[in-house]
Amino acid sequence: MDIAKRIRIIREAKGITQEELANRAQVSQAFISSVENKTKNVSLKVLEKICKKGLEISLASFFNKNIEELDKNIEELDKNKETTGIDEIVESLRNQLQLLVNKKEKVDEEIIIKSKELDKALENYYNTHYKT
């Protein structure tokens, strides 16, 4: 998986500039540029900030397999940009990527809500049956 390329693809799909991403994630624009150009590596802690604060996605969404498949398609199409109409296809794939990211985020939120509901139900059950 090409983390640098994935950051760039998701950033562009969301219409975010490097400067906006840097401001949101509280890092420098030069750092974002260096990461995207593969001249600097990004730690997991900073990647999490970039994802959550900058790209507004979870790490799970960032590493999602469906997105990885789209990455491969976009990468392949980027190599063959000379082909007529390829820009429209790449843009379409980027839009699909954005939809997947948004869908995954919604699922992540629903899981968190259901988990909290389960915790509350278990707490109520415990209090009703075991607490004196």
Image (cartoon, rainbow, N blue to C red):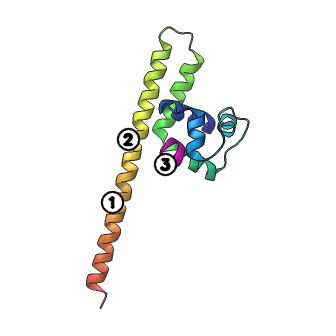
For disc 1, the marked residue is 114
Query: Could you give the CA–CA distance between mark 2 and mark 1, rounded to whole angstroms?
Result: 17 Å
Name the foreground residue: 60 vs 109.
Answer: 109
Sequence order check, earlier mark of 3 and 1: 3
Query: Could you give the CA–CA distance between mark 3 and mark 2, rounded to whole angstroms?
Result: 12 Å
Which quadrant of the view contains residue 21? top right
What residue is drawn where x is 31% and y is 88%?
A: 131
Residue 5 percent location from the top left of the image = 60, 33
Query: Could you give the CA–CA distance between mark 3 and mark 1, rounded to whole angstroms?
Result: 17 Å
What residue is drawn where x is 38% and y is 58%?
A: 112
Mark carried by residue 58: 3
The local crowd at label 3, few if under 14, some if 14 to 19, many if 20 or more residues have their Cα within 10 Å, is many
Horizontal side of 131 relative to 2 (left or right) equals left
Sequence order check, earlier mark of 3 and 2: 3
For disc 2, the marked residue is 103
Q: Is residue 5 visible?
A: yes
SS type, badge 1: helix
In the rendered structure, which segment of residues is drawn in magenta?
52-61
Q: Locate the C terminus by quadrant.
A: bottom left
Amino acid type at mark 3? Ser
Residue 69: in magenta span: no
